[in-house]
Amino acid sequence: MKTKKRIVYVIISLLLIAAVVIQLMNNKESAQERVYHYNKDKAVKVQADTLKLQEAEANYRFTGTFEPNRETKISAEVQGKINKVYVDEGSTVRKGQTLIQLDNTLLKLQLESIEVQIEGLEADVKRYGILAKADAIQGIQLEKAELGLKSAKIQRSTILEQINKTTIVAPFAGIVTTKMTEEGAFAAPGIPLLQLTDINRLKFTVMISEKNIGLFRMNQAYMVVADAFPKTKLEGSINLIGSKADLGNNFPVQVTIENNPEQKIKSGMFGQLIIANDTESEQIIIPASAMVGSTIQPLVYKIENGTALLHPITVSKRLENKVVIQSGLREGDVIVTGGFINLFDGANVQFN
C-alpha cells in the first residue's frame, strides 16, 4: 500500500515539474516574440546631402581668452591692526592711491621719543664742539656724541619708513577685484588683503596648431573681437609666440591690446583673433554634425550604390557649426547628415 502511495507521489511530482517546464518554455517563446529583432538587411532611413562647392569664409578665426595685463595680490609689508579700508570690491583706483591704513600709534610714539634724543644729542655735539676747540675736553667725547647723533638719525629714518609702510597704496592703476579683509582685522607680511587687476591693457591668448603657426609674426598688428561685443574691433600686436607645444600639439600665441575707454572687455571673456585670407576659393563644406569618429581621425558616412560606408576625411578649419574639408570628399559625393541610429558601416540606406 505504501509503495503505491509513493508511486502516486512521484508521478504527481513529475507531472508538476513537467507543467512548470512547459510554462517556462511558453513564457520564453512569448518573450522572444515580443523582443524587437533588428533586420540588418533592411534599409535604414537617413538624411543625406549631395556635396557642392561653396565659398568659404575668407578670414581665419582663432578662439582665445582675454587676460589682464597686470594682476597682483596686495599684502602689508609690516604687521599691525587694520584701522581703515578705503576701497571695496569693484572700486577703480589710481596708482599711489591709499587703499588700507594700519595702526601706527606706537610707531609715532617711538618717533617722538627718538626726536627728543636727537634734539639732546645735537645740543651735546654743539656744546662739545665749543669745548673741544678750547681744549677743555678730549676729542673722543665729541666723536662719541657725533656717532650717537648719527645712530639716532638712522633710527628715526627706520621708524619713518615703518610708518610709511603702514599706509598701503596701489602699485598701479586698476580695479579691486577681490577684497579679503575688513577693518579691525590683523595684517601681516605675506597675507593677501586685496587683489588689484589692470584691464586698461589686455592680453589675448590663443592656442594655434602647428599648421597655422606660420600665419603669425612678432610685433605684427592683428584684429581681435570679443564674443560679447562683436561690433567692437580691437587691434593689437603679438608679443609672444610659444616655442613649446602642449599635449595637443598647439602653441600659445599672445596679443597685447588696449581696452576701450569704457573698459567693456573683462578678464576671462572669450573672443576671436581674425586674420584675413587673401586666397578665396570654393571648397567642400559640411555640417560638423555629419562627422563621426575622433577629432584625430574624423569620418563620414559616404553613400555609394545605396550603401553607407565609413570614409576618412581631413578638416582644414572649422566655421562655427560647419567644417571645411581639406581632402577625402569632392563635389557630387553623397554623405549622411542625419538619422545615425542603427546606422553601421556597410548598412543599406534609404534617403530622399
Image (spheres, rainbow, N blue to C red):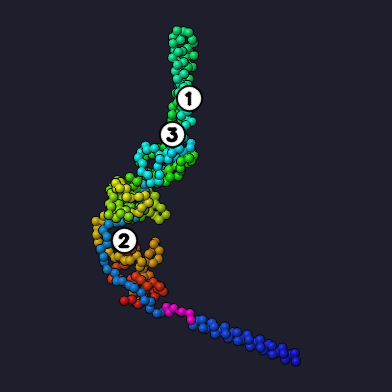
Up-down relation of residue 102 to residue 209 (above or below): above
Q: Quadrant of the C terminus?
A: bottom left
* Label 1 – label 2 distance at C-alpha: 74 Å
> What is the residue that sits farthest to the right in this orientation?
1
Up-down relation of residue 314 to residue 44 (above or below): above
The answer to which image quadrant residue 22 occupies is: bottom right
Residue corresponding to mark 1:
113
Residue 324: x and y, percent?
A: 31, 63
Front-lying residue, 113 or 330: 113
Front-lying residue, 295 or 210: 295
Residue corresponding to mark 3:
165
**Left or right of 251, for residue 276:** left
Residue corresponding to mark 2:
319
Label 3: element kind:
helix
Closer to the camera: disc 1 or disc 3? 1
Query: What amino acid is labelled 2 in the image?
Result: Leu
Q: What stretch is highlighted in magenta?
A: 34-40
Whether label 3 touches label 2, CB < 8 Å: no
Please name the residue shown 32% across and 50% down the image: 264
Residue 143: x and y, percent?
A: 47, 15
**Left or right of 340, for residue 14:** right
The answer to which image quadrant residue 38 occupies is: bottom left
Determine crowd level at label 1: few under 14, some 14-19, many 20+ residues with C-alpha closer than 10 A.
Answer: few
